Image: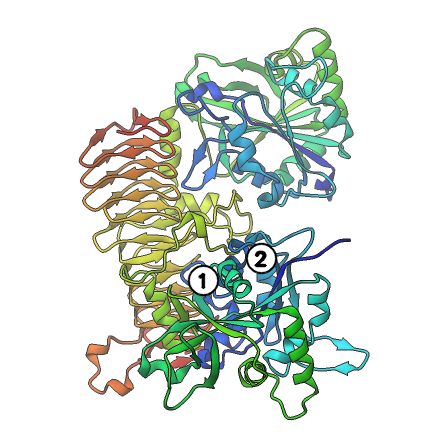
Amino acid sequence: MYNKKECVAMLLAGGQGSRLYALTQSVAKPAVPYGAKYRIIDFPLSNCVNSGIDTVGVLTQYQPLVLNEYIGDGQPWDLDRLHGGVHVLPPYQKASGAQWYSGTANAIYQNLSFIERYDPEYVIILSGDHIYKMDYSKMLNFHKEHDCACTIAVIDVELEEASRFGIMLANDDDKIYDFEEKPKNPRSTLASMGIYVFSYAKLKKYLIENENDADATKDFGNNIIPALLENNERVYAYRFDGYWKDVGTIDSLWEANMDLINPNIPIDLYDPAWKIYSRNPVFPPQNIGKNAKIQNSMVTEGCFIDGMVEFSMISDGVKIEKDAVVTDSILMPGCTICSGAVVEYAIVGENSVIGEGAHIGARPETIDNKDEWGIAVIGHNLDISEGSVVPPKKIISEDIK
Amino acid sequence: MEINMGRVLGLIFANMHDNTISEMTKARTMGSMLFGGRYRLIDFALSSMVNSGISDVGVITKANYQSLLDHLGSAREWDLSRKKGGLHILPPFGHVQTGLYRGRIEALYGATSFIQNSLTDYVIMSDCDMISNFDFRPFVKAHIKSGAAITVATSTQSFPPELIHESNVFAVDENGRVKDVLISPEVSGSCTISLNVYVMQKDLLMDLIQDCNARSQFSFERDILQAKVRELDIRAYEYKQYYSKIYSMASYFRANMELIEPENAKLLFLPKRPIYTKVSDNAPSKYGLDSDVRHSLVADGCVIDGVVENSVIFRGVKIAKGAVVKNCILMQGTNVGTGAELCCTITDKNVKISDGRVLTGTDGYPVYVAKGAVV
């Protein structure tokens, strides 16, 4: 069967996302709910299909159950294809032995045989922890025009933020000459977005060399990119100026959700030409009750809302009873906020129940010591009994009786 | 007694009763009429069958079925994209010597080879004029247990005369046997009406159809139910779950409004028996700073900045700041301009209400704005 694909995408989805604490205790970070009806992985998957890339390998390792079920046969993203489509790629046992993915580069290395089946010219490496809309075909064209070995998508960040990222040092023509991982004193503001386009022959060569180097950490940022630069390969920065947000921490996940209801933030989910696809649960429309008041919020199907909701993201199947108040919060699928409960500046995990009169989180202006303030988090499938008080910044991963 | 629902064929008539609500079926079938914020009427019959374990379904169409084809696609959303069985659309002219049918018998005759080739023993027939979450398992069970030739789902209560006029009324004895059939009678008060849902053995159905067709008889209700009421054991199966029937613009309006009440919604949208529909990948709905939405059903993809009360809002509706929408049904893609006021109005797909316009109907006679119109 002739199966050639010009470009294959490899999506790194095995990370634990440990800085999301209770939210990633039982699910991998890419499967964390976002934006009322999405999961984080919907963004790179939708970008792929909207960019004309129909072959995607999803590398999983940590807590793959929810992610596997969510991706399924890839139909929601139109990635159930006769040739190609989406494939979940967990680590597996080989004749030579079994090995977990020991780094991002090693994960791709262990799946070279998957890539070879499609005989691609290019491979795009993506990660499952960012919210953005990007046309990868434009980046691929840039890669071809500049005859690169590797093209790295970069975004201009504020200088004070630059030390959180991998920073690229590039000439005026955007050719990269040096790279620093999370530098203390950044010399540039071009941050890597963790999106790489490789010419496949080069990728394969450097992955094999890296694998044979016993001292290497088997990571793209630490090993592969420096090795390319050392050997004077053509590595270019591809500038992206749209919305892009890492959602690796509680704060950034909360901010990225709130960005969707901020009219000044340029991320549009209503563009019919660049839809973000997701596996839709089967639910009736939102049922808005007689006592409801909803302002500046996003709400999706299957919700019963009879309370007050402001500046919040309400996912599918959420119930908010009469006299409950939800402000500046994220309610993940299936959770219930009982009558009289108050949820402020909080994230409530899937299927958790906040009992009557409970109070979760607090507004920043009510706390004198700002170091004590932060987003309160209730993990998944928890019961918070009536009248409980969960202070700000607290992360709850067990029932409160 | 365990019944194998895999041996039951589902047949849905998409065009039956089109004429009862002709404004809305001008360019679509009854089955593809929009309902409840995100559904088409056929979703209820189809989901009921799928949730009852039926995996072999034929949809009989007559005219205007482009919208129905678009909606059903490969039927994957109903889990009917199958290797064995699955969903089949049965258009007119699908068979030599058949064309636009005059009645149910001719429609079935046109689908003879499909019905005969299906690996099933029983046939359930349903129309698309009923909103329900019908569990067909006890229905088939009762049919087999009674040994009846035909079992018909019925409802007994006091109905409005307009509904009775669009229905078949049965006289039923104490054993549930149908003794008399009246077609569209002018009666009032409490009576037993047919819900136009039938189950019978496939072989019997085929024999009756061949026989009637040879005699140029085309009405299932008149030429089989009524004419053979003595000869065949026809039983009534009283359906006691939530349902509503669409037989006029006013009943359509009422059936939508009923679902705003959570008690009714909970009877229809059962978590273990979901109503499936086509997925359209809309973003969640966005409620703006000045929005005030109460007592309404809202689908995804809407952007609401105005006031909404007692209304059913379909996917992708935009309601601008200062607009007031009360007791309305706004279908997919309706755009309501700033300061517009709508009361008891049904807008079909992609209607645009310009800034400041005012439309007012009544419960019994809602204003209807046709597809794509600009007011």
Q: Is residue A227 above or below residue B281?
A: below
Q: Residue at x 69, y 72 (%)?
A: A111
Q: CA distance from mark 2 to mark 1?
A: 30 Å
Q: Chain of mark 1?
A: A
Contact (Cβ within 8 Å) of mark 2 with mark 1: no
Q: Residue at x 63, y 74 (%)?
A: A203
**Circle 1: residue type:** Pro
Q: Which mark is residue A254?
A: none
Residue at mark 1? A333
Task: From the viewer's perspective, tell me whether residue B122 is left or right of residue B172.
Answer: right
Q: Is residue A27 visible?
A: no
Q: Quadrant of residue A173?
A: bottom left
Position of the C terminus of chain A, as image quadrant, is bottom left
Image coordinates for residue A345, horizontal then vertical, percent: 30, 72
Residue at mark 2? A53
**Circle 2: residue type:** Ile
Image coordinates for residue B234, horizontal then vertical, percent: 65, 22
Q: Is residue B122 visible?
A: yes
Image coordinates for residue A106, horizontal then vertical, percent: 64, 80
Disc nearer the start of the sequence (2/1): 2
Question: Is disc 2 in the same subunit as disc 1?
Answer: yes
Task: From the viewer's perspective, tell me whether residue A37 is left or right of residue B214.
Answer: left
Q: Is residue B13 above or below residue A103?
A: above
Q: Quadrant of residue B190?
A: top left
Q: Nearer the viewer, residue A132 or A327?
A: A132
Q: Quadrant of residue B110?
A: top right
